[in-house]
Image (tube, grey):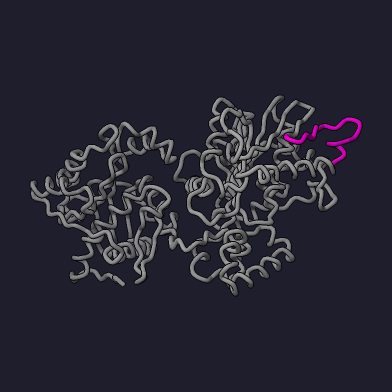
Amino acid sequence: METVRDGKAYQYARWCETETEGKVPKYVKLQAASWLNIADGKDPEAVVDEKAYRKICRILKIMNHPDLHRSIYDGMEDYQWLFVTAVLCTKMRGQDVRFYTTGLLEIARKNFKTFCSAIIFIILLLTDPPFSRFFSVAPDLALSSELKNAIKKIIKTSPALYSELDPAFKLLQKQIICKINDSEYTPLAYSQDGMDGKLANAFLADEAGALDAYPVEAMRSSQITLFNKLGIVISTQYPNDDNVMLEEIDIAKKTIDGLLEDRRTFALLYEPDQELQKGDIWQKDDRVIYQSNPVAVSHAYIFDEIKKKRALAVLYENKRENYLCKHNNILYKGLGAEGYIDIQKVKECRRVEDPEWWRGRRVWVGLDLSQTDDNTAVAIATYEDEVLYLHVVGFLPAGRLEIKSQKEHVNYAAAVKAGECIACGEEVIDYPTVERYIAGLEDSLGVEIVQVGYDKWNALSTVQKLEEVGIECVEIKQHSSTLHAPTKLLKEKILEKNCRYDANRLLEINFENARCTEDTNLNKYVNKKRSAGKVDMVVAAINAICLMMQELLYGEDFVVQTL
């Protein structure tokens, strides 16, 4: 009797985790390792249900692959085995409820992603409770119907599912009905169908890179009362930086990195690692193709076809955007934004908070004041023996805690309880609380404030009050020419493991959100508008470091590269 650990899903996950040639991207490796921990029975919250796995295997054996003329059990791609098994067979420990409520698949074109979704939906139609309803959403009806067409092909080529005498499915023009349990699947088009009130047991958001958040949120809202629900979100990259797929990817990365508490997303993100997306690396490095096209690893002819497309994209600029987005999952439209730093490198610099350590130390304070209901941050920085030390606290309106938590997928209530941020004011931040916090640092931590660095926007009143109590404040121009050096120093210190910050998950989320842009003089800085979420705590830290560097540059004990 085949067990999960004998199967292709487990074997592929193990290969992903241990692969050393750069053919598997970072987040696929991490997700595979996380799921293997569950499959090995080591996770306190989740298990892989062997009974469910055997049931799915039996169904896959009676489903025929319309192109390969053999069972889907024998014809599924390795990544499909992992995705299907993880999403459908991973259960809450002690409950017959699927652990993952979202299955996210970012994968290049022609990797059979819609076919993979069709397999899942046929299984759901056959196995979910009677009268379950399933939907696919896409920008238009043609795209949404791609899933329906893939389901039909599998059913019509599988005698066990579509015998002339007693077919298990009724294939209608607008929907597919499973006669066994009266479940039904209907494709919807964003362009012409209302998404609300559908009560979706499961849904597919296809080509999510071309969708805004509404269809996905509408489907999820319909699932609020359901105990066992599932959303499948799949897409290649699209040449825009405002779509629901990017939001889902961002949430998935933070989940995999352990920054979010809700672990109920299973994501296979086949996008090249950050270092492979720089400059023209894609033109020659085959790892870019392998990491975005898992089927190219096992099918040489697919790899060769993609290489041909790459050669044309190298030669012709007008083919470049389509190639990079659709075949490499690289967002290409001259955005000029890149991730600031690997969050795993950041987390290596975390230390247990020790207020006594700060006592007697000279510190520089960075302030990032918010717009009305946005986040504010205060950072203090100092150095010792070439090591940079940081302590950062956030501020946010108490009356918007719940709304912000839902919108930003951050548990702000837990962050407040942990002392990572302070809730003050109702709809807007209470600035006097921020001012009292800064003015009280010399008493609360026993530090000596050398200077406070600030962006003049919306800060003049606060600065005036701080100066009235004898604190020197210095304006820091928010320009690449000023911010490049401290931005570079902070990154270097983290990579060298010569940075220590007091443990703060909210700060780590800010680091993961941070995106850098480059000016014409190659000066890099954290760009708030291009970042993937709140970055106020990182900006405050950079402001503090900017002031600190002035002493370091002209002091005798510490040498800093600024170029």
Compared with 475, 4 (above or below) is above
- Look at the picture and state if 311 lies above or below 253: below
Residue 294 is situated, as x and y percent measured from the top left of the image, at 66, 58
Q: Position of residue 328 (x, y in %)?
A: 59, 61
Left or right for 529, reference 425: right
**167 magenta-colored:** yes
Q: Main secondary structure of the magenta part?
A: loop
Q: Give how far across and how far down residue 161 sits, in percent.
A: 83, 36
The quadrant of the image that shows the N terminus is top right
Residue at x 45% of width, y 55% of height: 344
Tell me, yes or no, if residue 224 can be seen here.
Answer: yes
In magenta, the rendered stretch is 158-174
Is 496 positioned to the left or the right of 354 in the image? right
Residue at 52% of width from left, 38% of height from top? Answer: 214
Is residue 321 located in the magenta-colored stretch of the structure? no
The structure residue drawn at horizontal position 61% and vertical position 38%, both measured from the top left corner, is 192
359 displayed left or right of 74: left
The residue sitting at the bottom extreme is 315
Q: Quadrant of the C terminus?
A: bottom left
